[in-house]
Amino acid sequence: MAQAISIEGGPSSRAKQWRSTPGVDEPLRARFGDMGCVDSKSPNPTESCSIDNPATAVSKGNQSAPASPGSSTQSTRTGSKSDSRMSTSSVASERSRESILGRFAFAKGDKALLGEGTSSVCYLGSDVETGDAVAIKVYKPSRKGSATLAKFKRQVSVLQELQRPLERPAEEALWCEELASADPADLFLKLLDFSKDSDGEPAPDQADGRLYIVTELAQCTLKDWLRLRSQRSSPLSAESVRKIAGEVVLATAWLHAKGFVHLDIKPENIMMCGGRWKLIDMDGCVRAGSVIKMYNSSVSFSPCYCAPEFARLVVKGSSMVVKPSMDAWSVGMTIAELVNLCPLLRAKYQQISAGQSAQAGTMSFLKWLGAMQAMGLPRRPAWSQEGQFKALLYTCLLVPDPEFRNTLAQSLRAPYFRRQNMG
Ligand SMILES: Nc1ncnc2c1ncn2[C@@H]1O[C@H](COP(=O)(O)OP(=O)(O)O)[C@@H](O)[C@H]1O
Ligand SMILES: [Mg+2]
């Protein structure tokens, strides 16, 4: 299969620029986490950072949010607090079109804003032909226009590729029978449309120059849902954890069997849609085996979820070969969060970064992560100490040495999931 994404290239002298000039290349401070346990002066280690500047997470609200007609609210439909810097002024002052791509209308009113990510804002819309509700992802204007365009094109090509039938990959470890019977429509959001040039290729919209992606509408992120459970002191049952974990592992195994690596798997990038948890945000997906370099601002990661080997490479500032095992760790962290209801490493991050600048704190945390020998797991609820769940995390996914970490297809064969299949 053709290499869809080229992420090689560029002058090596820039490779370490982010280290010597923090904040110059990407002068964005991380947003105060909305889960209330991170100091407001610290970066939020659960939000995505650009790898060219890991200490200054690409925060929500630091770039101007694209306007949406009729959108005057700052609250999101999924429950996330929108950042106060999300620039209501830009929403109010910019005039946008009533409809886009000749077919989709933005919703009006205070339900119009669905959510905001590192590089985009997502609005509620409708298909004017069918009346169906849709999600319209609008990329934020950025000084790094080429990186944004690269993310947008990646999102389109990966979503298109994911809906095509899966061929059994050459690498046996990436295959399991569950993949043969899975339907990609159950695993990923359906792409409905996107802005194009006159040849129909993904490009800035010919009418207003913006980058749009329209997908099926999802209901809420796993992050928001877990926060709600945490606020209500309502832990998930063992069966719920098994079901969600199975869906996340299956979707990521499919992505890997297709030859992609996500690189930013976390509860914020998993959404409930049509009764299933689906993997979203393919902007940063790259082909397994690609080499990424530190100045590549179109690739993001989140410190609390990134694999130890990824952390080591960021600390060293060297280029790295992307492998599916990096996602396997992030999936393990996400599954552990299903029982913890809060990012597993957030407290550690706070402890390590206390009293340091944003850059120094993040680098100290990444150094610690890169040197970690064994991942500690939550002790509650009691059932999470049960053998098969612990074995999934300890012996399959949260294994610091990537050589000994299982692939996600292998993990689906673990006794923990087999028991589910047997009912
Ligand atoms: N299809 C969708 N339906 C509803 N909300 C969505 C949808 N896609 C994205 N969102 C919301 O928008 C946020 C940002 O989307 P995402 O694709 O993760 O963009 P980014 O690359 O900017 O992180 C998500 O965290 C979620 O809250
Ligand atoms: Mg996202």
Image (cartoon, grey):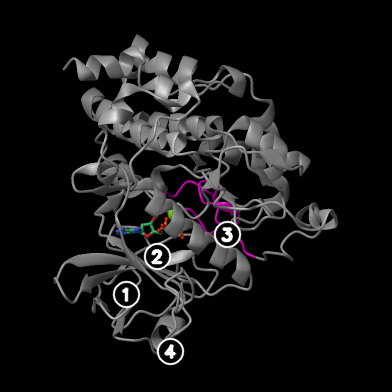
Residue 410 picture location, percent across and down:
42, 20
Is residue 362 positioned above or below 237 on the image?
Answer: below
* Distance between the alpha carbons at the discs numbered 3 and 4: 24 Å
Q: Nearer the viewer, mark 4 or mark 1?
A: 4
Q: Earlier in the sequence, mark 3 or mark 1?
A: 3
Q: Which mark is residue 93?
A: 4
Q: Which mark is residue 403?
A: none
Q: Seen in the image, is 198 located left or right of residue 44?
A: left
Residue 167 picture location, percent across and down:
39, 34
State whether label 4 is within 8 Å of ligand 1: no
**Label 4 residue SS:** helix
- Residue type, mark 3 in image: Val
- Residue type, mark 4 in image: Ser
Q: Which mark is residue 73?
A: 1
Looking at the rendering, the stretch of residues picked out in magenta corresponds to 28-49
* 10 Å crowding of disc 4: few (<14), some (14-19), many (20+): few
* Type of secondary structure dominating the magenta stretch: loop
Asked if the residue under mark 2 is in contact with the one under mark 1, i.e. CB atoms within 8 Å, the reply is: yes
Asked if the residue under mark 2 is in contact with the one under mark 3, i.e. CB atoms within 8 Å, the reply is: no
Q: Earlier in the sequence, mark 4 or mark 1?
A: 1
Q: Nearer the viewer, residue 193 or 305?
A: 193
Q: Residue at x 24, y 35 (%)?
A: 234
* 10 Å crowding of disc 2: few (<14), some (14-19), many (20+): some
**Label 1 residue SS:** loop
Q: Earlier in the sequence, mark 1 or mark 2?
A: 1
Q: Nearer the viewer, mark 3 or mark 2?
A: 3
